Image (spheres, rainbow, N blue to C red):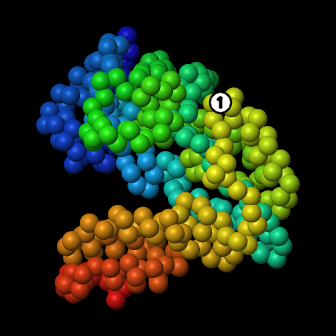
Amino acid sequence: MFNVEYEDMYRAYTDCRKRKKSTPGAKKFETYALYNIVQLTDEINRGKYKLMPSSCFVIEYPTQREVFCAAFRDRVVQHFVYNELNPVLEKLLIRDTASCRIGKGTDYAVQRVARFVRRETENYTGEAFFGKLDLSGYFMSIDRDLLFAKILHVVEHCYTGKYKDVLIYLIRIIILSDVTKNAQRICPISKWDTLPARKTLFNNPYGIAIGNITSQLFANFYLNSIDHFIKSRHPSYCRYVDDMIIVDKDKGRILETIRMLNLMLPGIHEKLNPRKSQVQNVKYGIPFLGITIKPYYNCLGRKRINRMYYTSSGITTPEDMFMSAASRKGMFERYKGYHVSRRWYAQWPAEIREALIYLPNYKLKYA
């Protein structure tokens, strides 16, 4: 029926294994990796591929979210789809759509917005405004049928590889299958009692699972037409998943764009979150991705500082403390975090801080 080559599926497996090699599912799959890859490839070629039950849980911080973890074999298939489809979508997305793109993470998005501010204010000599827009329950509001139609159009008209029919077959399964069917809840079911209905896929005809690499790819592309529309009106525009920043000298033009978006977004089953959307002068600082972008410099925002304390609260050994400090050293340097780092460092017990200086290659001097 299809003709997927084993080598391409193996490449998807190695890409998937880089990030998930320590998980139980990855270790189990790796025990008979070659056999499992051949079997998986054969299932796809015969048109017999089906999704295995996913695991799901609810995270509490920084906000309540429902996350789905696909079985490792399904993650391999998702990486295969990603490897074939991503180069095509990269050509269609605007430059300033960040997230899940090579070289375009949070730092890239923050730097782009900072550059837009300098451009619109003519290096801080004039006045400019920003519009910070956020979508309400973005992942859980995506229309799966509309998303599939958009991706199908791209595959049929833009994809020039050798797996067009295979991609259509797999994308249909990935997008349109009900991931909640037979899903295993690996946290107390009581956590769903406080989860709003708009933030869960259970009993929801819309939405895609948070946690899959294809979900991130599809979420980027789902708003592509909105990106091109806003970019045509505001050259200084950047989006990170569902967080949008518009910088313009004309406040009225931003307000008019927001009015037009309120008319357009219901057509794709999305809407702006009025509580998290604002229009303000750039001189007061732009809160974006946990960073506050101010004239001449960027600094850590309160949310990112709180999250840093939260994620490091369980550290009990000098080795773990060193790894945590090393991973944040660049962030402190980029975002004027010297005083924050001092306070963060001082939270650990004295015995851990004293033991830290005896570790090899210790170069982080916060004390």
Residue 96 position in % (x across, y down): 64, 52
Q: Is residue 308 above or below residue 176?
A: below
Residue 177 position in % (x across, y down): 42, 21
Foreground of the two, 246 or 82: 246
Image side of residue 333 versus residue 248, left or right: left
Q: Which element carries disc 1, helix, strand or loop?
A: helix
- Residue most toward the top? 1
Image side of residue 233 versus residue 353, left or right: right
Foreground of the two, 185 or 128: 185
Residue on which the image places disc 1: 268
Image side of residue 48 versus residue 225, left or right: left
- Which quadrant holds the N terminus? top left
Which amino acid type corresponds to the residue marked 1 in the rendered image? Ile
- Which quadrant holds the C terminus? bottom left
Q: Quadrant for residue 347, please give it.
A: bottom left
Res. 9 in view: no
Residue 207 position in % (x across, y down): 50, 31
Say which residue appears at 65% left-offset and 30% top-offset: 268
Say which residue appears at 49% left-offset and 47% top-offset: 100
Q: Quadrant for residue 125, please give it.
A: bottom right
